[in-house]
Image: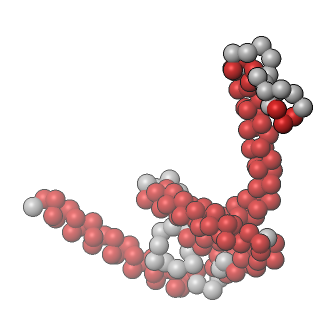
Amino acid sequence: MKVKNSFAREHELQSQADKVLQKMWFNEILFTWQWWILVFVAPWIVWWRLVDRNRIFEILTYGLMVTLLAISFDAIGVEYDFWEYHYQLIPLLDVLIVFDISVLTVTYMLIYQCLQSVIASLAGTLSRVASNKSLRRCGSAAQLNGSKRPRISAGYGGSAE
């Protein structure tokens, strides 16, 4: 019975806090310059001008992953009181979802677009280095076959062994 009362008390306190936040938001935050900054139109306009339209699906998929992670981590941080937001686009959520789905996502998508060629060339270089090291460790193909000299096929000017 005690647990039920504490849940009811928590629900009551949360409802009161939500009502106070909604009144404050409507009277003090709505349509202020800070509220307009939170409106996320500007980052997406910049992104649309700079995005590589040939890779738009790939970049948007990456952006969706970034958005989901950002919203999740933001919700955890707000829930555990690591941080809080005083200005919100709408007073329904404690997280600053506008930042998560606009500024952060657009920034990471543009970084991904610009650095993907660098990442691909680094991955290629690393794979070549790794394959060269594995060949040196294993020895040459002739040593692996057990013969002292490499086999030459008949079609290349030599006789087949």
Q: Residue furthest top?
A: 148
Instruction: Please indicate, yes or no, whether residue 84 appears anywhere in the rendered image.
Output: no
| Residue 155 position in % (x across, y down) | 84, 36
The foreground one among 100 and 1 is 100
Up/down of 91 relative to 126, above or below: below
Looking at this view, name the residue that lies furthest to the left: 1
Q: Is residue 31 visible?
A: yes
Where is 90 relative to 108, above or below? Answer: below
Name the residue at 70% across, 26% down: 134
Relative to residue 156, is residue 111 drawn left or right?
left
| Coloration mode | secondary structure
Q: Is residue 1 left or right of residue 39?
A: left
> At which x and y percent is residue 35?
63, 79
* Residue 105 quadrant: bottom right
Instruction: Name which quarter of the figure residue 52 lies in.
Output: bottom right
For image coordinates 9% across by 61% down, the residue present is: 1
52 or 95, nearer to the observer: 52
Position in image of residue 9 (x %, y %): 23, 67
Question: Horizontal and vertical percent for residue 4?
Answer: 15, 64
Quadrant for the C terminus, please. top right
Residue toward you, 102 or 81: 102
- Residue 37: quarter of image: bottom right
Q: Residue at x 56, y 74 (%)?
A: 88
- Does 17 appear above or below 118? below
**How many numbered marks appear?**
0
